[in-house]
């Protein structure tokens, strides 16, 4: 796969007949629009999709339905969106893992069920650093405490994730490599179930997006030890970054963005971009994110496409470095 083609394809206008294009833009949509979320409710993608769906519904005057199609760490839902009819009626609220999950299939010698360049970026919605969380009754008051304990008992401290190679698994792999520790990975079918398992004390620690975990921190149930952002952020005031703690290049964002299948007509893409611009300027929508401590991070298509490409170039080598999990466990 040529990554340059992805960027060129995202920024180029799809080739369609010019006759009737304005009419198509005006008429679309004439029926319900579905936004696939490749995870169960409760995680970052679902958190991003639901306010956006309400905003689009208000603009389009037709229903905009969020459909949770989970499985394989997001692979099933992503593939379903990539294979959907390219008419704009099936969209995907994707996480960062959408770009590198096909690479994980190649690690196992399988043909990927989709390629990330089969999906065209429309707009970025959120871009939060992953946050390292422990319950308030845990013995670790700092990352240093956690690392020291993990070195004493390799493979005994457990962490939940959204699935193998998923959006909250990869940051833990980066952390383990940098800290020289071994944790026990317990994958779930999405960020929501991973959070539920953590709150229910089925695992010791987890990584979550701020908008998902902040309510538990405010209630005193969870302690936030660090985040994977590249620099301090007001929303996580007082919480150190992994880089500040000495873990060089351990930087990871759980971004969420809207995508359409490749081949979606240019007038429909334009209509979606215009609608997302309105949605992400609506204080009722952005207020939902702000209140949760996960401020909107809107990007229109050109900027978002470049952002995705930069993330791909950084994260795919990390996934390759992680390698096959079955081989690591031997």
Image (spheres, rainbow, N blue to C red):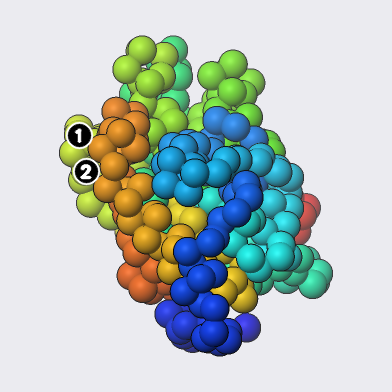
Q: Residues within 10 Å of mark 1 (few under 14, many from 20)?
A: few
Residue 92, quarter of picture: bottom right
The answer to whether residue 37 is visible is no
Figure check: 43 above or below 88: above
In the foreground, 76 or 120: 120
Residue sitting at the far right: 110
The answer to whether residue 193 is visible is yes
Mark identifier at residue 233? 2
Figure check: 272 above or below 235: below
Q: Residue at x 61, y 24 (%)?
A: 197
Give the side of residue 305 with respect to residue 114, left or right: left
Q: Are marks 2 and 1 in contact (CB under 8 Å)?
A: yes
Q: Residue at x 41, y 62 (%)?
A: 273
Q: Residue at x 54, y 84 (%)?
A: 19
**Gap between marks 2 and 1, in whole Å?**
6 Å
Q: Secondary structure at mark 1?
A: loop
Figure check: 202 above or below 151: above
Residue 60's spot in the image, x, y percent? 48, 49
Residue 241's spot in the image, x, y percent? 28, 45
Residue 250, quarter of picture: bottom left
Q: Residue at x 32, y 17 (%)?
A: 218
Residue 159's spot in the image, x, y percent? 57, 34
Give the side of residue 272 with respect to residue 73, left or right: left
Count of numbered badges drawn on the protein: 2
- Quarter of the image with the N terminus is bottom right
Residue 294's spot in the image, x, y percent? 33, 38
Q: Residues within 10 Å of mark 2 (few under 14, many from 20)?
A: some
Residue named by callout 1: 237
Figure check: 96 above or below 310: above
Q: Secondary structure at mark 2?
A: loop
């Amino acid at each position: 796969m040529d990554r340059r083609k992805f960027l060129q394809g995202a920024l180029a206008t799809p080739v369609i007949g010019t006759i009737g294009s304005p009419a198509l833009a005006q008429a679309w949509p004439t029926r319900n629009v579905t936004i696939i979320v490749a995870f169960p409710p409760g995680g970052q993608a679902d958190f991003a999709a639901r306010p956006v769906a309400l905003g689009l519904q208000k603009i389009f005057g037709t229903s905009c339905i969020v459909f949770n199609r989970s499985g394989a760490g997001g692979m099933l839902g992503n593939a379903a969106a990539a294979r959907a009819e390219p008419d704009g009626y099936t969209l995907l609220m994707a996480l960062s893992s959408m770009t590198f999950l096909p690479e994980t299939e190649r690690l196992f010698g399988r043909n990927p069920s989709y390629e990330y360049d089969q999906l065209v970026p429309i707009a970025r919605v959120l871009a939060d650093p992953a946050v390292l969380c422990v319950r308030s009754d845990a013995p670790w008051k700092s990352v240093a405490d956690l690392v020291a304990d993990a070195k004493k008992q390799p493979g005994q401290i457990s962490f939940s994730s959204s699935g193998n190679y998923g959006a909250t698994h990869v940051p833990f792999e980066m952390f383990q490599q940098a800290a020289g520790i071994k944790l026990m990975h317990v994958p779930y079918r999405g960020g929501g179930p991973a959070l539920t398992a953590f709150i229910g004390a089925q695992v010791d620690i987890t990584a979550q997006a701020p908008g998902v975990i902040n309510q538990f921190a405010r209630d005193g149930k969870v302690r936030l030890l660090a985040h994977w952002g590249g620099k301090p952020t007001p929303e996580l005031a007082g919480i150190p970054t992994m880089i500040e703690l000495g873990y060089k290049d351990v930087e990871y964002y759980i971004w969420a963005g809207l995508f359409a299948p490749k081949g979606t007509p240019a007038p429909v893409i334009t209509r979606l971009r215009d609608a997302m611009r309105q949605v992400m300027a609506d204080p009722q929508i952005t207020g939902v994110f702000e209140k949760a401590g996960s401020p909107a991070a809107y990007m229109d298509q050109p900027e978002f496409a470049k952002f995705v490409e930069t993330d791909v170039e950084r994260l795919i080598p990390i996934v390759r470095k992680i390698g096959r999990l079955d081989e690591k466990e031997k």
